[in-house]
């Protein structure tokens, strides 16, 4: 699917609009006209947000590029080349572009081929690419390894960084800082946390939050410090699966918040404000607006710079989808 790549370049259009004064935007619009000529309509169909750079780039036809590209290699290549031409115009050695794509374990050949097209370009685009994936969710035949080989053949400099969970010492430092206690005092709690979470920072935060919500981690006003009982925590049998932990937490939420999370999960990691507004006017989903405000406060959802709402972590979206 090309949706992730197209979405990223669409966001770039909004950033260009926000960070450039009108005279500079006018120069950029002229460069786009000169480069694309009659093909500017194709660009507008692929990148709907290119219209924010100039009203003349508004496409009269709703884009269905992803459907057209699916299953058709030539269409996918055409989309990739069109995006590349655009990126050449808006990037330079003085103002390079950084493209970050998360969860590449879900990417297919089409999207990764387009990424290779971007990175192997020698005609003027300036890009720094960062892609992340979960190595426990891919096998040796995953397309991402083909991308790495192709980049090596194309002499594109690459670096691979493996991120592992926090080790025992760093985890204990993190917990002691959070609780404002000496590290030696937190050793017993850290032993439990690392066994349950394997040091995953996101899981650690959710696990600590769960301990507090269940009253297993409390602030003692008499002692003026956080206290816990490791034997009680062990006896409680809290799950060592972050999905189960999130599901348990979500099942205790109000109906309005659960409804909002389930609806948002169906739209992916990000939901447009206009979608929330439309749904809140219907009888069936009239409670989503109230649920949204509570979900932001509770830390499940956040508002991005574009005004859309997104899950703070893909595991939260996954748990919400399974409600």
Image: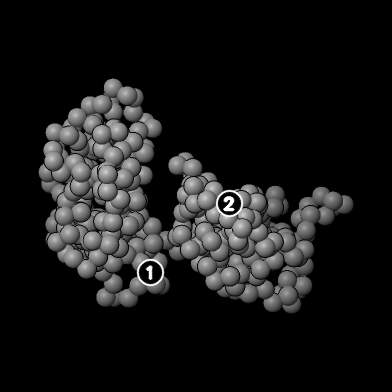
Give the percent coordinates (x, y) of residue 84: 19, 47
Question: Residue at position x 38%, y 32% from top?
Answer: 18
User: Could you tell me how far apart the alpha carbons at marks 2 and 1 are, in whole angstroms?
Assistant: 42 Å
Give the percent coordinates (x, y) of residue 201: 54, 60
Quadrant showing the C terminus: bottom right
Left or right, 238 with respect to 320, comes to: right
Question: Residue at position x 58%, y 55% from top?
Answer: 282
Q: Residue furthest top?
A: 23
Name the residue beneath numbered marker 1. Answer: 135
Q: Is residue 85 above or below residue 163?
A: above
Give the percent coordinates (x, y) of residue 7: 34, 51
Left or right, 42 with respect to 106, comes to: left
Question: Residue at position x 35%, y 33% from top?
Answer: 17
Question: Residue at position x 18%, y 65% from top?
Answer: 72
The reply to whether residue 234 is visible in this rendering is: yes
Q: Specify how the rendered protein is coloured.
A: one colour
Question: 10 Å neighbourhood of mark 2: few (<14), some, or many (≥20)?
Answer: few
Q: Which mark is residue 281?
A: 2
Q: Which mark is residue 231?
A: none
Name the quadrant containing residue 34: top left
Q: Mark 2: which secondary structure?
A: loop
């Amino acid at each position: 699917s090309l949706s992730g790549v197209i979405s990223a370049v669409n966001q770039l259009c909004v950033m260009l609009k926000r960070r450039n004064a009108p005279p500079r935007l006018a120069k950029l619009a002229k460069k786009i006209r000169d480069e694309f000529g009659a093909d500017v309509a194709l660009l507008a169909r692929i990148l709907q947000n290119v219209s924010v750079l100039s009203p003349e780039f508004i496409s009269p036809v709703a884009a269905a590029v992803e459907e057209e590209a699916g299953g058709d290699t030539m269409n996918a290549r055409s989309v990739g080349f069109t995006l590349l031409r655009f990126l050449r115009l808006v990037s330079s050695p003085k103002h390079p572009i950084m493209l970050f794509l998360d969860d590449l374990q879900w990417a297919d050949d089409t999207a990764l081929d387009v990424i290779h097209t971007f990175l192997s370009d020698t005609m003027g685009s300036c890009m720094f690419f960062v892609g992340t994936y979960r190595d426990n969710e891919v096998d040796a035949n995953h397309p991402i390894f083909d991308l790495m080989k192709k980049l090596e053949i194309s002499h594109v400099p690459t670096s691979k960084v493996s991120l592992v969970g926090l080790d025992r010492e760093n985890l204990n430092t993190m917990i002691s800082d959070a609780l404002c206690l000496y590290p030696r005092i937190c050793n017993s709690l850290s032993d439990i946390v690392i066994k349950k979470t394997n040091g995953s920072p996101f899981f650690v935060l959710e696990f600590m939050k769960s301990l507090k919500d269940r009253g297993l981690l409390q602030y003692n006003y008499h002692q003026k410090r956080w206290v816990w009982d490791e034997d009680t925590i062990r006896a409680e049998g809290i799950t060592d699966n972050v999905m189960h932990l999130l599901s348990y937490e979500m099942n205790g939420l109000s109906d309005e918040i659960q409804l909002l999370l389930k609806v948002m999960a169906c739209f992916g990691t990000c939901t447009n404000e206009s979608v929330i507004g439309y749904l809140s006017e219907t009888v069936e989903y009239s409670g989503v607006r109230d649920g949204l405000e509570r979900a932001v406060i509770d830390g499940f959802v956040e508002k991005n710079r574009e005004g859309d709402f997104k899950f703070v972590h893909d595991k939260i979206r996954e748990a919400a989808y399974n409600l």
